[in-house]
Amino acid sequence: MNFLRLTYYLLVINFKDFGYIFWTIGYPLVLVTIFIATTSNLGGEDMTNIEVAVTEDNEYTEVLKQIDFITVNEMSDSTARAELDAENVTGYITEDGSLIVQGSSFHASVLESVMNQIHQTSILGVSPENFNFEADFIQSNDMETEPQVVMYYSTIAMVSLYTVFTSMELISSMRPNLSTMGARFSASPFSKTKYILASSVAGLFLGLMSNAILIGYLMIFSESVLFNNLLPTLGIVLAGNIAGLGLGFIIGLTPRVNINVKSVVPVVFIVGLAFLAGLMGPGVRTVINREMPLINELNPLAHITDTIYRVNLMDNFESYWPTILFLLGITFVSFFITLIALRRKQYDHI
Amino acid sequence: MIAMDKVVKRYKDVIALDHFSFQAKENEIIGLLGPNGCGKTTAINCMLSLLKFDQGTIELFGQPVNPNNNKTKRRIGIVPQELAIFDKLNVVENIDFYCGLYVTNKAERKQLVNEAIAFVGLEKYRKFVPKQLSGGLKRRLNIACGIAHKPEILFLDEPTVAVDAQSRNFILEGVKKMKEQGTTVIYTTHYLEEAEDLCDSFVIMDNGRNVANGTLDELQKSISTTESITVKFITEDDTLVSRLKQIPHVNQVLQSQDKYSIQFEKNHNNLANLIRFIEDNSLTYTEIASEQPSLSSIFLELTGKELRD
């Protein structure tokens, strides 16, 4: 069987799998649709004169003062809390940047979004003193700054790594201790390298297709302009897909775990990475980066999210190639381990 | 063609193969018989070089087994006990996929796939995916995937488990045809009647050991079982059973209507003694037959257990 024929069969096997199609295409679309639906009315109400209390000498004061629709009132902690209780201010920003609001309201949501945005941008290396909420780089590129863009980018990053599923299943299908098909495969003279490469091509095709659908959907339906630099974004997405393949091979190699049980591993793995990278809200990301910065330094999903954000919202390519190299490094190590592990493999148990 | 010599395979403290030896010649069907867990599948996996073994040697086509010996692998086919087919591929695609692991030429592969489909009788189901097939038809597809490349040695691991009578006959006839075409078949089963009908020789396994091997005739001669002679008498004599028991070397007499099954100790001119008894007592009979022990009774005698235990 030639390479193309094998790739075709591997594509068919995955493409006809409803579960695969749902989780790689349907689920991300549902997710971003919910994001779009729940955040689309942010600009629908009057966003003028949101009263905010801040402590004296608060490092966020200058940033907040530059935002047109926010009125900053400096006062002591006790006064601020009293003003908040009296509902004279929408929110109170403490010295460490925490936001306290009195109940939920549209203005409170806007204020929360602003603070999330400030924290998120701060994490990316722009200090609050230098941060201008209506900064040139935002306005000049006609970009939106709602915190949901982080969620969109995290979703794209998450889908980039979905190739984990394809490669994990395919590597399991060639191992006799995990499947009867693996017994057939291992008893045959077929080249393992060829099979892995064909699996990779098939997985990559499906992964890129999922990403393309998601990006296209966001471009059409999101009110925000998310892709100011589309081509470099696709480069990151491609590198993410390739890294996902490698990680899937490694998970597929884990011994003597049933494929159905094993399928849970990448779900937990990816959702976990996405959570840490800010998919469930930038606040989580803020806490993780503050308390355990190493986690997201090793988190490929966080790297992809950050780089897409910087490239598209800040026109900043500083982390572009380091991220690509980081992802390709993961891929190289994973493929190397996989080939070594499968070469001339005989098993103690089947 | 296949030579396993004193192979030992341990799973921690459990010995799956205990100095297991057997040989298979070219163009024969060998029944590897034994109860569940006796080591049949382990033996096959060792022969396929999927499993490491601790001691002993295994040779296929005169060469030691080796997971990297693609020349040997090319000449082997495997039909595992469980279905090993892709749910999302149709009949033709499944067979083509597995055949493609051995055959690169597209035209040759197409012909082999068509032959395999005809061989297992799935012509009407070419475009069906497995979930549209009955259990028996899925089994046939499983077999087609293993034989399409025309292997010289075929390992068939319990191919008729949970299969309807029609598909079972189809499979058994197919195995016979494969033998006619020159294939050596290693056939594991715990259906002894099926094995008796199909196989040229047998290896009886128990607890990872080769308890006995040979043709049915050789196995029958090798065991010290009783000789059974069945007679149908025309008589209403109620004392006949007790009188039959007085014949020398009779162990037991079982009566079922007019049929009397008399168990003798072996090698004592039992048939002659019985005929003399009939003449002396002026008895009339319609049928008399000396029965050889079946594979089931051989198995029972050798292992002390029923195969389906």
Image (tube, coloured by chain):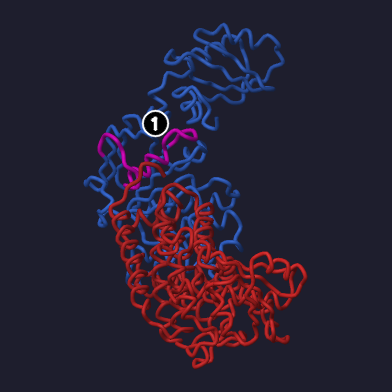
Q: Residue at x 60, y 61 (%)?
A: B131
Chain that the image shows in red: A
Q: Position of residue B165 (x, y in %)?
A: 60, 48
Q: Which residues are magenta?
A: B33-57
Q: Colour of chain B?
A: blue
Query: Could you tell whether A272 is left or right of A249 in the image?
Result: right
Is residue A20 on the magenta stretch? no
Q: Residue at x 69, y 17 (%)?
A: B235
The residue labelled by disc 1 is: B208
Mark 1 secondary-structure assignment: loop
Of residue A39 and residue B290, the one placed in the foreground of this image is: A39
Q: Is residue B54 visible?
A: yes
Q: Position of residue A221 (x, y in %)?
A: 62, 85
> Where is the C terminus of chain A found, in terms of image quarters?
top left
Q: Position of residue A70 (x, y in %)?
A: 64, 82
Of residue B295 and residue A17, the one placed in the foreground of this image is: A17
Tag 1: amino acid: Gly
Is residue B49 on the magenta stretch? yes
Q: Chain of mark 1?
A: B
